Amino acid sequence: MSDQTTYPVPAAWAKRTRIDEAAAAKLYGRSLADPGTYWLEQARRLDWIKRPEIAGDWSFDKADFHIRWFADGKLNASANCVDRHARTHPDRVAIIWEPDDPAEPPRRYTYAQLRDEVCRFANVLKAAGAKKGDRVTLYLPMIPEAAFALLACARIGAIHSVVFAGFSPEALAGRIQDCDSSIVVTADEGRRGGKRVPLKANVDAAAAHAPSLKRVIVVKATGADVPMQAGRDDWYRDLAEGVPTTCTPEPMGAEDPLFILYTSGSTGKPKGVLHSTGGYLLWAAVTHELVFDYRPGQVYWCAADIGWVTGHSYIVYGPLANGATTLMYEGVPNWPDASRIWQVVDRHKVEILYTAPTALRALMKEGDGHVQATSRASLKLLGTVGEPINPEAWRWYHEIVGGGRCPIVDTWWQTETGGALISPLPGATPLKPGSATKPLPGVDPQIVDSEGIVQQGAASGNLVIARSWPGQMRTVWGDHQRFFETYFSTFPGKYTTGDGARRDEDGYYWITGRVDDVINVSGHRMGTAEVESALVLHPQVAEAAVVGMPHDVKGQGIYAYVTLNANETGDETLRKALKDWVRREIGPIATPDAIQFAPGLPKTRSGKIMRRILRKIAEGEVDALGDTSTLADPAVVDDLVANRVG
Ligand code: WTA
């Protein structure tokens, strides 16, 4: 699958770049040789209430485990993303909002308008009782108010916890309860690809399982008629009436939490990944500028959803901290048709486009005509994130979308890392399709074998990061022990990413995918344990095991082996019922692509399910099952192979 063609930096880029290959190598070397000086220098790009004098202060060792950056500094993230630009460039457009329906006009907010909106929202939250350190859950569609709400929380020091608007009421309730949040901000409905999502109704359903919830603030997005519960629910519009458009930003310690974002792990329920104010914001800003070579005035579009970390770091915090013009799109790339994404590029003269391989694969299937019907002349740089990009999709993006003139920055990172860690710099790094290329300044990746032995030169194994960087998550909300165990106990003294990687002879990294029980469906992380828990809640299901399977568009699909209770029969009706069940329990992104009814699962004599075998069968590699002699009942494997689905 690897393609060894190297694409040099295009001539036009080599001419305009601020950092060429030699400068990039120098910068990287300096960042590791003298991190204290390097990071204090970088920190100057932020507007501090009290400028920090110490950079990193951390240890990944069990005895002295701690991670702190700029701990003596004070700042406010919303003042950095809004006020300072509103002062210097009040009329510059901060946010361009493109609605789901192309017949509707886009909206634009200048930095001065953004400041007013954020302050107003902040005052509404304050009046609703939100204070520094409180958790506020945001369950919003891709409307400008989502950005206002994030920044409003940051302004008053409340910790936002965004829950992706595609998650079910059950998933929402779990996330509200886990961080004990008493306020939810939502909308009457969301819109995506011409369809409506009943967000307020979902909050109502979640409230039944979320006793901590006291107030619901509802943004009117579609005007749908939704029931409002007196004493609990209010329209944002009513609360905002006559509210002042000034609000003094709360001085925050750099280590004070900025937000929580739940993400799937290999075991248990989703973890509340907690990010800090100073280190996170700096990481988002530095990487946004370096990776996208962002220059003031350029229209930049990250086509992610605010419900995921990519939306946090690269729609809101990174670009706005840099005074950029960031485009926010309400809809999906292929609605009303497969030209839409390119039409949006043309309509707003987008110069930098950042999207996911899964979207590209879906669009690629629709043929080149949809692309060629548009100009895309404004595009200068393309980016991808979320999963490895297959060279075929890479070349299509490069040739057909970018006309061969735009570098592609393939950015590897995770919810936990706060922003990109491995990525090309567009004016400096020769590209190899499918490789995220090299670490960014301050990032010290290593490849270790299963014993933790560091591999030199060209090698494959587990990807770990050997030192802290400012954007690193600080804890798992409410469970610091789990934070340590999950990320620092497998390979002591190092941050374990959970990804496998290969490093080639040029020092380029090729991410090979997760090495744990997390699967990557359309660039979204899904814990197999979560889908299993949902399945076994069904009254007819005795046991379930979920693994990833190859999928043309999604990258990985969800393959579920289900053992039914005695006397139940698996048929098409039940299969459909189970898929609907999981959709309802978690959300549409967790819907199994294939369900195989299995009379038994392959287990060791001690009762452990042998997932390796289940993965191989799901992948269709039935001749490579390996040693099955340690199974309690080797015969179950024959049945699984014979009744494979798909
Ligand atoms: C995968 C998304 C290959 C990886 C920002 C990681 C990638 C997980 C890439 C994190 C990439 C992300 N190439 N794989 N460019 N980017 N991944 O937390 O497996 O939603 O561990 O963060 O996505 O997913 P998450």
Image: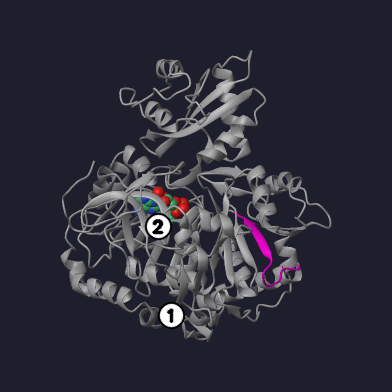
Secondary element type, mark 1: helix
Q: Nearer the viewer, residue 244 or 258?
A: 258
Instruction: Tell me if 293 is positioned left or right of 274 in this view.
Output: left
Residue 265: x percent and y percent?
Answer: 51, 47
N-terminal-most mark, 2 or 1: 1
Residue 94, visible in the rendered structure: no
Q: Gap between marks 2 and 1, in whole Å?
A: 21 Å
Q: Nearer the viewer, residue 143 or 206?
A: 206
Residue 340: x percent and y percent?
Answer: 41, 48
Which residue is under mark 1? 43
Marker disc for residue 413: 2
583 versus 100 height, above or below: above
Q: Quadrant of residue 41?
A: bottom left
Residue shown at 57% from the left, 52% from the top: 271
The range drawn in magenta is: 129-140
In magenta segment, residue 134: yes
Marker disc for residue 382: none
Query: Callout 1 environment at 10 Å: few (<14), some (14 to 19), or many (20+)?
Result: many
